[in-house]
Amino acid sequence: MSNGHLRVAVVTARGEGAEAGGAERFYGGLVAAFRASGADACEVPVPVNESTFDTIEEAYLRCWDLDLGEFDVVVSTKAPTYMVRHRRHVCYLVHTIRVFYDMFESAFPQAGEQLQRQRRQIQRLDTLALGFGQVRRVFTIGHEVAQRLQRFNGIEASVMHPPLGFDEFHSGPQGDYIFMPGRLHPWKRVALAIEAMSRVKTPARLVLAGSGEQEAELRTMAAGMASITFAGRVSDHELVEWYANSLGVLFPPLREDYGYVTLEAFRSGKPVITCTDSGEAAVLVRDGGNGFVVEPRAPAIAAAIDALWNDRQRAKQMGEAGRAFMASFDWDRVIAALLAA
């Protein structure tokens, strides 16, 4: 596959001082895939500060004013990069600003008229940018994002699962712990995982890797529980080894957009425990096939952990099924679809 010297801009949203996560891995993988196809691709990062409505508006204007005339193709990604203007602009949407969408009520339970007005303004801007010809075509990273776009903006999008942006994962021996990497944030539902561990009947341990705004609260909640380890922020090498030597991976977020955790676990040959309301993870995990999809309740998660502990052979088979599932994920297919659009 060769695209000559096609100049491609991948426009990304970068939060100042933010911990690198799935979106950043996606950006890197997308740029690398364009380059592997022969294109002259680069990331065009846009600073995005979501701490106040004023700074969010500034980011929207920053994207609108961006001059990308030197490029042949522009691919926007995360809100609000799709505000950019270009004759050959396709969007591969990570997500809109969720606090103004499906998470609004939980984030602002007592929202007044000003907040409601701000929410309507953001949704209106997104609808205009994505739905009225400024973008040639909209792809989303998963069904969860596509359904949200249809529900709130009335926009149809094509789902295209991206492969891993970083892929040094490998299988290792089954350990005595369940691994749960990710940001320590309420939407990731780490508290639910800790509650589940209090109900686990086997000697299985839980290793939490990552940091975040909820860390102090979670450490207090887990105080005295010898079965829970906080590994903190880990390097890529450490992350790979934690996956490789686990018994399985727990990933119970609320309506996750995509979640590279699922793919990383599968590439490591490990089964995944997720929840029925965990968004795209509940699509990728086949209950009883490459993991368990359970109700978002502590007893159900605990039972799944015990099931992996009590049947190591089945856990291994599930992990192998997940690894085989990953064979269908292909960057060449992604690049071809974006350029065809």
Image: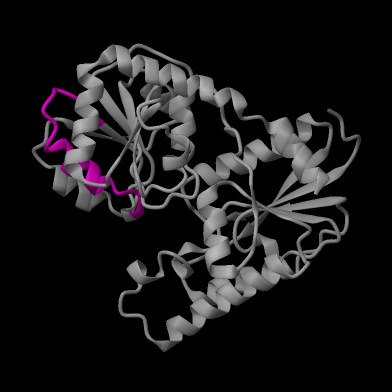
The residue at 16%/40% (across/down) is 299
Q: Is residue 188 above or below residue 53?
A: above
Write the start and end of the magenta stretch as one range: 187-206
The residue at 22%/20% (across/down) is 309
Q: Is residue 133 above or below residue 32?
A: below
Report whether residue 268 is seen.
no
Residue 341: x, y in percent? Answer: 80, 49
The residue at 36%/80% (across/down) is 111
**276 or 39, which is in the foreground?**
276
Q: Quadrant of the N terminus?
A: top right
| 102 in the magenta segment | no
Residue 33: x, y in percent? Answer: 72, 34
Residue 221: x, y in percent? Answer: 15, 48
**100 or 282, which is in the foreground?**
282
Report whether residue 189 is seen.
yes
The colour style of the image is one colour
The furthest residue to the left: 224
Residue 294: quadrant of the picture:
top left
